[in-house]
Amino acid sequence: MEIITILSIVFLSLCFSLTLKLFFFRPAHELPPGPPRFPVIGNIQWLKKNSFSDFQGVLRDLTARHGPIICLHVGSKPSIWVSDRFLAHEALVQNGSIFSDRPRAPPTTRVITADQHDIHSAFYGPLWRTLRRNLTSEILQPSRVRSHAPSRKWAFEILVELLKAEQKEKGQVSDVLGHLRHAMFCLLALMCFGEKLGREEIKEIEEAQYQMLMSYAKFSVLNIFPSVTKFLLRKKWRQFLNLRKSQEDVILRFVNDRRKDSGEVLCYADTLMGLEIPEEEKKRKLKGSEIVSLCSEFLNAGTDPTATAIQWIMANMVKYPEIQRKVYEEMKSVVGEKEMEEEDLSRLVYLKAVVLESLRRHPPGHYLSYHRATHDTVLGGLLVPRDGTINFMVGEMGRDPKVWEDPMEFKPERFIEKGEVQAYDMTGSREIKMMPFGAGRRICPGYGLALLHLEYFVANLVWRFEWKCLEGEEVDLSEKQQFITMVMKHPFRATIHPRNDNN
Ligand code: HEM
Ligand SMILES: *[C@@H]1O[C@H](CO)[C@@H](O)[C@H](O)[C@H]1NC(C)=O
Ligand SMILES: CC(=O)N[C@H]1CO[C@H](CO)[C@@H](O)[C@@H]1O
């Protein structure tokens, strides 16, 4: 009988306090509007009913109905979504110090990030600042990036081999994204560990990373009532922790083996070994598991979105041969008879416009990572509570007909003015028209490197091969959410033809 009584008391007092809260303590500002909400479970049920697989469609509907800032409830926590570029600018840029924190991560993510000791999930504060500043001032610094030119060449040749092999085997290339991911991964692994790793070694790291990535979904059940699942699902927890352990073993082996004498080119792992982070007024070196999480972040952040972006660009080049031809003709006039060099990229105006147009029309991520306000605050007249998350609808912003003429058309020319690429300010410091890399203090620190990788790989792919659509087929630009990136629902297929005049 006791259990029943206690439960009823708990339940009744919960109801009572909820009623009190609802009717008497209304805050001065209201939460943004959203779908109907049920106590405790939030409106997850509503979302399920409205097809969770099309989250983007659901958000778009809600925005059409309720306006540019809406609120969903995940459990009891408000989750706010902003589709308006002016509000995004006000929050991320003008009031960056208020909107740059991150929420507390769920338990499994805390394991994967070594208790939020990577740049991405770190709270806004001294630890985040130290980690981020070291990345941007060392590995991502322009002269160091330039010194990795041979690494890019190496990775590109890996890509060419994969493409040629598939074409030889199947008479066409169809897994372009897979090949791009692998080549990108090789490049980032090289920048991270500082040596040309062999095929087997790369495969080993790639596999460990892949397993960890899959574990987000596979073990997400552990995050529901963690105190209960820690006990009830002990076996699943152990399985998850073992997975993390093997990832740590693999990556730490490469961190410790990194070849210091491989020349003057510093690698990311080197800087992490020397780095000191602030902790409670003191400083300390990074722990092994933290180095693993930082390397892992570097590998993932630099691989997937970049590969996805190149897939979208190449899809458009296959769909619109005229655009591909223009890129090639421009290269011919800039590069001429000599071998193509990285310095040539700076003069490829049309290529740059193609890259920008693709980032607008097909940003690899249609949302940012969750941000959190440092205190309860007001945006667009509505409450943004600290006790929740706020995110921005990147995909919608790039397609806003109020900003972009014919937004669904692929028109690189819109970025060209008087033969120059419009100085498009990726950081959005004055205004935001699109934000494939975010904006403000949490803007992607790798955006310069990412743009270089996009231009370099696309230029070389077009320079080396002519890409042709399969006879009777058309490139389908439908989208599909896959983890954090938006990929092609039906990956394009093509045949590739070596360009005789430069091979
Ligand atoms: C086309 C390629 C890329 C795209 C579209 C992209 C996009 C983004 C976006 C949207 C964010 C979240 C911003 C926010 O939450 O406000 C982000 C964060 C981040 N990106 Fe990228 N990224 C790309 C490539 C890279 C590369 C090459 C690196 C590093 C080598 C990198 C490292 C990071 C890191 C460390 C963060 C976390 C920043 C923080 O929280 O302070 N990204 N990126
Ligand atoms: C980054 O870390 C290295 C140690 O690995 C240190 O020598 C360097 O001064 C740091 N740079 C910045 C800007 O904090
Ligand atoms: C939400 C928020 O804090 N908005 C403020 C941002 O900064 C401007 C001035 O720069 C204020 O007027 C807003 O109230």
Image: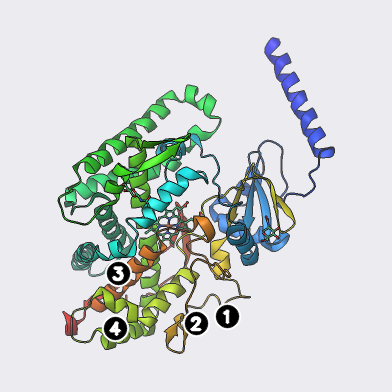
Q: Residues within 10 Å of mark 1 (few under 14, many from 20)?
A: few
For badge 4, the amino acid type reads Met
Q: Find disc 4 in the rendering and name its residue.
A: 331
Q: In the image, ligand 3 is in what quadrant? A: bottom right
For badge 1, the amino acid type reads Glu
- Vertical position of residue 63 compared to residue 10: above or below: below
Tell me whether circle 4 and circle 1 mark residues in contact (CB < 8 Å). Answer: no
> Is 19 placed left or right of 140 in the picture?
right
Distance from Cα at disc 3 to Cα at disc 2: 22 Å
Label 4's element? helix
Distance from Cα at disc 4 to Cα at disc 3: 13 Å
Q: Find disc 1 in the rendering and name its residue.
A: 405
Label placed on residue 414: 2
For marks 3 and 1 on the same chain, the one whose residue lies earlier in the sequence: 1
Q: Residues within 10 Å of mark 3 (few under 14, many from 20)?
A: many
> Is 121 placed left or right of 20 in the picture?
left
For marks 2 and 1 on the same chain, the one whose residue lies earlier in the sequence: 1
Tell me whether circle 2 and circle 1 mark residues in contact (CB < 8 Å). Answer: yes
Q: Nearer the viewer, mark 2 or mark 1?
A: 2
